[in-house]
Amino acid sequence: MAESLKRRGAIVRAPENFLSGDQIAAVGAGRRDFLRQAMIAAAAVGAGAAMPARAAEASAGDPDILNLPPWSTTLGKPVASTPYGSPSKFETNLVRRESPGLTRVGASSVSFAPLQGLFGIITPSGLHFERHHQGWQDVDPARHRLMINGLVGTPKVYTMDDLMRLPSVSRIHFIECGANSGMEWGNVAVPTVQYTHGMLSCSEFTGVPLSVLLEDCGYERSDGHYVLAEGADGSSMTRTIPIDNALDDVIVAYGQNGEMLRPENGYPLRLVVPGVQGVSWVKWLRRIEIGDQPYGTKDESLHYVDLMPDGTHRQYSSIQEAKSVITTPSGGQQLVGQGYYTVTGLAWSGRGAIRRVDVSADGGRNWRRAKLETPVLSKALTRFNIDWEWDGAPAILQSRAIDDTGYVQPTMPQLRAVRGSKSIYHNNAIQSWAVAPSGEVSNVQVG
Ligand SMILES: Nc1nc2c(c(=O)[nH]1)N[C@H]1C(S)=C(S)[C@@H](COP(=O)(O)O)O[C@H]1N2
Ligand SMILES: [Mo]
């Protein structure tokens, strides 16, 4: 009783407590001011009375919480004071990050997307991961051209204006660098999901289907069976794409999340190759050539090959197999106490849609089926979540994706049995996060 009275007392604390020093000084300065103050006070009491007991309790630690904050009592900023909006100043920690020492210079490095802080499936464009072989450029769209040549009826050169007159599609797809999770082949290497899985992003891309452009250039199916895509940056990025792939769902894209591509992501033109590893998504795309055999370029014969246990190299393993990861709770995070949590994460497959995601809290002994959040799209990230009651004991959280071909995401030991442990690329193993009794979450490998 005394407790609840104390609470009520706290809630209806004297109105002047809700007024700033300035406002108190203004009281009595005139009738208008008096009315204004009375209204502010009334509103404040109203707000206070509506406050749940929990908030009142919280106020015991921070008496100031019951005072009307400046944002409730002052005029806000005018429209268009930030012509291009940016995140709140309270969110400055959520940024792309480099893994120090990964490469010698930043122009040939990677920045990882902060998966631990994102919701839903779309990566905000400013947080999209970056992977450049020779730095990024802000290419002048007026001077950019796309050439289509090789085994086509009529080779053509397109301006951006030409391209933007053609029929377009907008589709949501994930892009994952083939080297994502590549540091974890031997053992645990990096602490957070940003570094283990952050070479992954998902956007709505807009552009012209490559099939439309090839038709425009008089391509006949009998002509050639491979497409070479080339970028305009200094790295001369080139990749071979099989024609079936190219005619299926490949997009010559200029749009990303409703606006033009960001320079870091290939402005003004990039190839979108759904389901295929990032390196084929050639940025600053300047040329498409049709040929009758794979080109065997440096980016497919020397790089992006898989070192197998027998010492041979596997080439052209381009499709990103089904994979998933829990993003909260994840390495580096801290549980605030026992009880209820929503465990959430992302699942994706380069072969189609995610059919099911299972979650284990005991290192893979028992699995429960997670809820898939809508939309569930082909070759896009799918968000999953599941309820979890943490009893304070050590736990190992894992997620396992199954795609609509029936493929089941392997454990790390299963993958190593086939691939060995000296690879860099195409690690789609199940990720484990250990929860300690302290609530600390860390990256571990089990089994
Ligand atoms: N022209 C060009 N295209 C490129 C690259 C590059 O360095 N130059 N990097 C490739 C690699 S390895 C990846 S993983 C993706 C990364 O795309 P993003 O920087 O938009 O995330 O772009 C690919 N396309
Ligand atoms: Mo990549």
Image: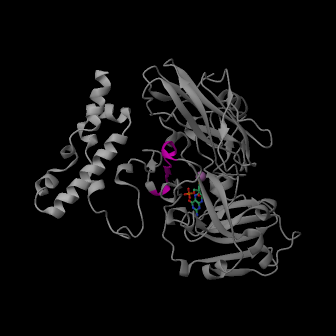
Q: Is-magenta flag for residue 71?
A: no
Q: Is residue 11 visible?
A: yes
**Quadrant placement of the C terminus:** top right
The x, y position of residue 68, in whole percent, is 27, 48
Lateral position of residue 52 relative to residue 241, left or right: left
Q: Nearer the viewer, residue 170 or 104?
A: 170
Q: Position of residue 428 (x, y in %)?
A: 66, 39
| Relative depth, front residue between 181 and 79 | 79
Left or right, residue 266 beside residue 273: left
Q: How many marks?
A: 0
* Rendered position, 164 above or below 180: below
Image coloring type: one colour
For residue 74, side relative to residue 278 (left or right): left
Kindly identify the residue that appears in the image at 57 percent across and 66 percent down: 258
Q: Residue at x 50, y 48 (%)?
A: 112
Residue interval drawn in magenta: 107-118
Pick the quarter of the image with the N terminus.
top left
Residue 428, visible in the rendered structure: no
Q: Is residue 112 magenta?
A: yes
Q: Residue furthest right?
A: 222
Say whether residue 140 is left or right of residue 269: left
Q: Report the image quarter containing ligand 1.
A: bottom right
Residue found at the far top of this picture: 393
Q: Is residue 40 above or below residue 336?
A: below
Residue 78 sits in quarter: bottom left
The spot of residue 305 in percent (x, y) is 67, 47
Q: Is residue 391 above or below residue 137?
A: above
Residue 369 at x, y percent in the picture = 69, 32
